[in-house]
Image (cartoon, grey):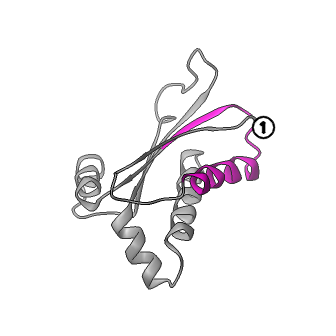
Amino acid sequence: MTKPKVLIYVESRYKVDRKRIKSAVRFVLEDQNVQTPVEVSVAIVGDRKMKALNKKYRNKEGTANILEFPLNEGESTMLPSDIMRLGDIVISYPMVIKEASEQEMLVDDRVEELIQHGMLHLLGLHHE
């Protein structure tokens, strides 16, 4: 498997482990036996941004811990470069902190869980 291209955007006040984010993406791709070169973007944002996205794209009030925006809905995602662009994963850092505290786990562990969950969604695998 070729190394996935992971574009990471983090609002400046949040500290995340970028290597773990990339590793979580790679883990899901390997686990799902994805052979094609892949690009995915991950954004770590605050609740204000997440509330705005949730309202705009899902018409829901309030925040969410994660939103995924797959590029495979509609036309083909294969552009001339032959990289499969999966889409975007957006995570609310304040929600991650809250959930990590409630579940008595490390913030980076919760980020990793959400990245893996989001990757499965971008690959078209949804929970029942």
Q: Residue at x 48, y 35 (%)?
A: 71
User: Where is residue 14 shown, x and y percent of the image?
Assistant: 38, 59
Q: In which quarter of the image is the C terminus?
A: bottom right
**Residue 128 seen:** no
Side of 46 relative to 25 (left or right): left
Q: At label 1, which amino acid type do we have? A: Met
Secondary element at tag 1:
loop
Q: Is residue 43 shown to the viewer in this render? A: yes
Q: Residue at x 57, y 69 (%)?
A: 109
The residue indicated by pointer 1 is 1
Is-magenta flag for residue 53? no
Where does residue 124 sit, x and y in percent of width and height? 58, 46
Q: What stretch is highlighted in magenta?
A: 18-41
* Total count of labels: 1
In the displayed structure, does residue 32 sit left or right of residue 92?
A: right
Residue 79 position (above or below residue 59) = above
Q: Position of residue 89 (x, y in %)?
A: 46, 49
Q: Residue at x 24, y 47 (%)?
A: 56
Q: Which residue is drawn at 75% across and 48% down?
A: 30
